[in-house]
Amino acid sequence: MIKTILFDFDGVILESMDIKTKAFADLFSDYPQYVDQIVKLHIDNGGMSRFEKFKIIYNDMLKKPLSQEEMELLNNKFSGYVYQSVLDCPFVEGAYELLNKYHKHYLFFVVSGTPQEEIKSIVKERELSGFFVDVFGSPEDKTTLVAKVLRDYKLRPEEVLFIGDAINDYEGAKNNRVEFIGRVRDKTTNPFIKLKIKRIIKNLFDLEQHLKEISNGEKI
């Protein structure tokens, strides 16, 4: 029986993935020859923290050293590009309704690739804090964050479900023996196409139906 649900944020609670895709293109506009590769890196690794993406971009594409000072500068610029837009963007269809309806029935957590303080601020500004027991963000990866939630709140993996839209989310769940449901906006952007994931949702109204089926004893 599922008692706890972990949610990735961008692309699961808010339709904010396109905002961050544009931010990566804008942030590295001085390197037009690499922009397509950088955007692909971001899209293919939706659940990865931006810090890890910056490291890969500098090491594998730009072939430049990345100091801690430069990392912080990139992060601050990126936040400046996206913060207000994320506050203004729409919910994934059904997300607010599901959170509002079920937050007293399940323990809800955010497990995001966005930096910790930034994601906490966004959740607060969007007036969602009351729905979540806690909010977790990077620089830790999803496997580490899921393990932290399980440890800190003494949760049993078999009672936990993770909703994510990226391979990193799936791996974070799998590595902690937590069940996973993938959110896919449309068939052209399905990162799970090669994986044997039984349950895929297009929106959070779909998730409600899956939760009813699971509560009736159907396996994930």
Image (tube, rainbow, N blue to C red):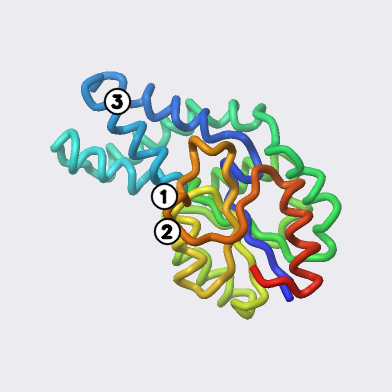
Can the viewer see residue 52 in this picture? yes
When asked about the image quadrant of residue 127, the answer is: top right
SS of the residue under disc 3: helix
> Dot 2: within a 10 Å radius of its alpha carbon, few (fewer than 14), some, or many (20 or more) residues?
some
The residue under label 3 is 35
Q: What residue type is labelled 3?
A: Val
Q: What element carries label 1?
A: loop
Q: Which percent across, then down, holds residue 201? A: 65, 49
Question: How far, Cα to Cα, is label 1 from label 3?
Answer: 18 Å
Q: Where is residue 132 in the image (x, y as percent from the top left)?
A: 72, 57
Crowdedness near tag 3: few (<14), some (14–19) or many (≥20) residues, C-alpha within 10 Å: some
Q: Earlier along the polypeptide chain: callout 1 or callout 3?
A: 3
At 44% from the left and 53% from the top, the residue drawn is 167
Q: In this view, does 187 lie to the left or right of 155?
A: left
User: Which label's residue is closer to the chain start, 2 or 3?
Assistant: 3
- Say which residue label 2 marks: 141
Q: What element carries label 2?
A: loop
Q: Position of residue 143 (x, y in %)?
A: 45, 65
Amino acid type shown at disc 2: Asp
Q: Are marks 1 and 2 in contact (CB under 8 Å)?
A: yes
Q: Do the residues labelled 2 and 3 touch (CB within 8 Å)?
A: no
* Residue shown at the point (18%, 43%) measured from the top left: 59
Q: What residue type is disc 1 on?
A: Met
Residue highlighted by disc 1: 48
